[in-house]
Image (cartoon, rainbow, N blue to C red):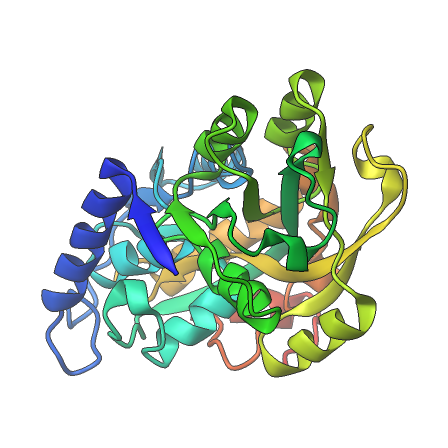
Amino acid sequence: MRIRQTATAAAATAALLALAACGNGDGEGGNGDAEYTDDLTFATGGTGGAYYPLGGELSTIFESETEASVNYVETGGSAENLGQIHQGQAQLGLSQNDTAADAMNGDVDDLDGEAIDNFGWIANLYPEAMHIVVRDDAGIESIEDLDGATIAVGDVGSGTRAISDAILDYYDVDYTAEETEFGDSTEMLADGQIDASLFVVGVPVASLTELAQSTDVSLLSVDEGDAEEMAEEGFYEAYTIESDAYDFLEEDVTTLSVFAALIASTDEVSEDLAYEITSALFDNVDQITVDQGASIDIEEALYGIGDIPLHPGAERYFEEQDIEIP
């Protein structure tokens, strides 16, 4: 497999490795002792996906409902967000649950194997589905047909790459990897620079809807049995993208999914502020206009948490709401 990174991706790789290298080496976060702040940086994702606009709307809610100031910023995604929280460059972040779990164990390559343990779970927000998008004129009708293709597999620092690898390795696909942000990958697909784009995002995603208006594209389906087997081996779930999710779909698509979670620093976000943020989230769900907001439900707030620790403030809130804590 050959990998070609964009200049931005290469810079992101260097930045992530630098973040990990700057750690204190004992598993503690960047600050060591807690130094709480109300001036929060919220690490989101690329502008072409759901994390960035959702982070913007959540920032507005948190600023209006708490005493904190919240600045949301574009990032490469889950792994980068965890790295920024680890080093105190961000206090809030969005992350796939599988990436967060791997980061706790030092199993994220983009973080140079550094174990990240200074963050806590606030809430599961919505499921994120793997989309395997191909141009109709590429003659690709199955995942096996991707052999020899040039494929966008997610940005450096995103959680997409791990699931991309899991699927492509499972089917033993030999390919050239393009590491780039999801929005850029749709443009590259439209221009014929790549044959396929794999990305993990909430359903539906506007960028794909826009792409389909100018370019004939399809979503590849994973065999249901294969999806179940891969789900057993990783932090994934088999998932169905319904045919009415996108106008160009004619039938349901089977794929893998993870959960998008809101996380917060335990070094710099106090229990009281995390409690207020958790309360603000669920008290103001009706203010969220992005499609993924419809999936935010307090009854599902702990889906996918696994062994990831709850932030003490979120734990207090859920206890008061009689939400069973795993």
Q: Residue at coordinates 53% horizontally, 37% vertically from top-left? A: 49
Q: Nearer the viewer, residue 135 or 179?
A: 135
Q: Nearer the viewer, residue 275 or 43?
A: 43
Pick out the residue farthest to the top: 214
Q: Is residue 188 above or below residue 231?
A: above
Q: Nearer the viewer, residue 234 or 194?
A: 194
| Quadrant housing the N terminus | bottom left
> Exactly how many numbered labels are in the figure?
0
Estimate the x, y position of residue 28 in percent, counting from the top left: 20, 76
Q: Nearer the viewer, residue 90 or 314?
A: 90
Q: Residue at coordinates 29% horizontally, 62% vertically from top-left? A: 110
| Quadrant housing the C terminus | bottom right
Q: Is residue 115 left or right of residue 197?
A: left
Q: Is residue 296 left or right of residue 244?
A: left
Estimate the x, y position of residue 257 in percent, counting from the top left: 66, 60
Estimate the x, y position of residue 25 in percent, counting from the top left: 13, 79
Q: Is residue 315 above or below residue 76?
A: below
Q: Is residue 278 above or below residue 40?
A: below
The answer to which quarter of the image holds residue 263 is: bottom left
Q: Is residue 273 above or below residue 251?
A: below
Q: Is residue 313 visible?
A: no
Q: Residue at coordinates 72% horizontally, 58% vertically from top-left? A: 255
Q: Is residue 86 visible?
A: yes
Q: Residue at coordinates 31% horizontally, 69% vertically from top-left? A: 109
Estimate the x, y position of residue 64 in percent, counting from the top left: 48, 32
